């Protein structure tokens, strides 16, 4: 009789695995930065090629990933019994993909997207700060990082137009 190797893995374990970016969220120093690095690789090697061929497909794929991230982050908050625990890095992973959207796929642009995203994620300029303080649950975890990613992407899109 065949058995599924995943049959014994609990939903809690799967949520923790996804929310922490394969347990990168447990890195004691700068887990959000490590999650952002995971997002950088995901964006560079998966989303950028898709987005440059079909932005609409990339947007649809991103929307699915964002909604899944909200559900996963909400589940992780319940598991960790803490709002926006530093162990939850799925928000950085997904937002980093947004920060890179439709940028040239060359290292200076990717490094700039990474740096600006991390800066805005840490500083949380309005409305990210309001979202972080007021919105609870998985959507709150995800949306403040998405705001930071949008800031980073907009700055780089303007820079691209000017260069």
Image (tube, helix red, strand yellow):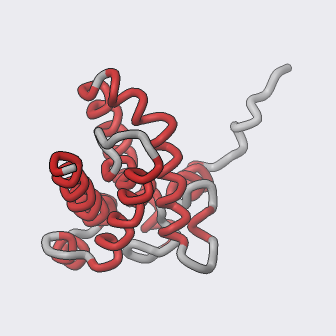
Name which residue lies at 24% across and 26% down. 56
Residue 31 appears left or right of 136: right
Within the image, what quadrant is residue 115 found in? bottom left
Q: Is residue 155 above or below residue 50?
A: below
Viewer-nearest residue: 85 or 13 = 85
Residue extending furthest toward the right: 1
Q: Position of residue 18 (x, y in %)?
A: 54, 52
Q: Is residue 133 above or below residue 34?
A: below
Q: Position of residue 47 (x, y in %)?
A: 41, 35
Q: Position of residue 27 (x, y in %)?
A: 63, 72
Q: Position of residue 82 (x, y in %)?
A: 43, 77
Q: Is residue 80 above or below residue 21?
A: below
Name which residue lies at 56% across and 67% down. 25
Name which residue lies at 34% across and 32% down. 61
Residue 4 appears left or right of 16: right
- Looking at the figure, which quarter contains the N terminus? top right
Viewer-nearest residue: 110 or 33 = 110
Residue extending furthest toward the front: 163
Viewer-nearest residue: 158 or 71 = 158
Residue 44 appears left or right of 135: right
Name which residue lies at 48% across and 34% down. 46
Number of marks drawn: 0
């Amino acid at each position: 009789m065949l058995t599924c190797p995943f049959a014994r893995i609990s939903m809690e374990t799967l949520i923790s695995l996804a929310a922490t970016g394969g347990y990168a969220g447990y890195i004691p120093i700068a887990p959000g930065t490590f999650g952002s690095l995971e997002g950088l690789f995901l964006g560079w090697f998966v989303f950028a090629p898709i987005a440059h061929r079909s932005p609409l497909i990339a947007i649809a794929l991103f929307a699915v990933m964002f909604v899944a991230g909200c559900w996963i982050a909400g589940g992780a908050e319940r598991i960790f019994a803490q709002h926006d625990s530093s162990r939850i890095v799925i928000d950085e992973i997904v937002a980093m993909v947004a920060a890179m959207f439709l940028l040239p796929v060359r290292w200076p642009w990717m490094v700039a997207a990474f740096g600006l995203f991390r800066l805005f994620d840490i500083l949380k300029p309005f409305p990210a700060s309001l979202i972080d303080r007021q919105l609870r649950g998985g959507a709150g975890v995800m949306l403040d990082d998405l705001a930071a990613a949008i800031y980073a992407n907009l700055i780089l899109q303007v820079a691209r137009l000017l260069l």
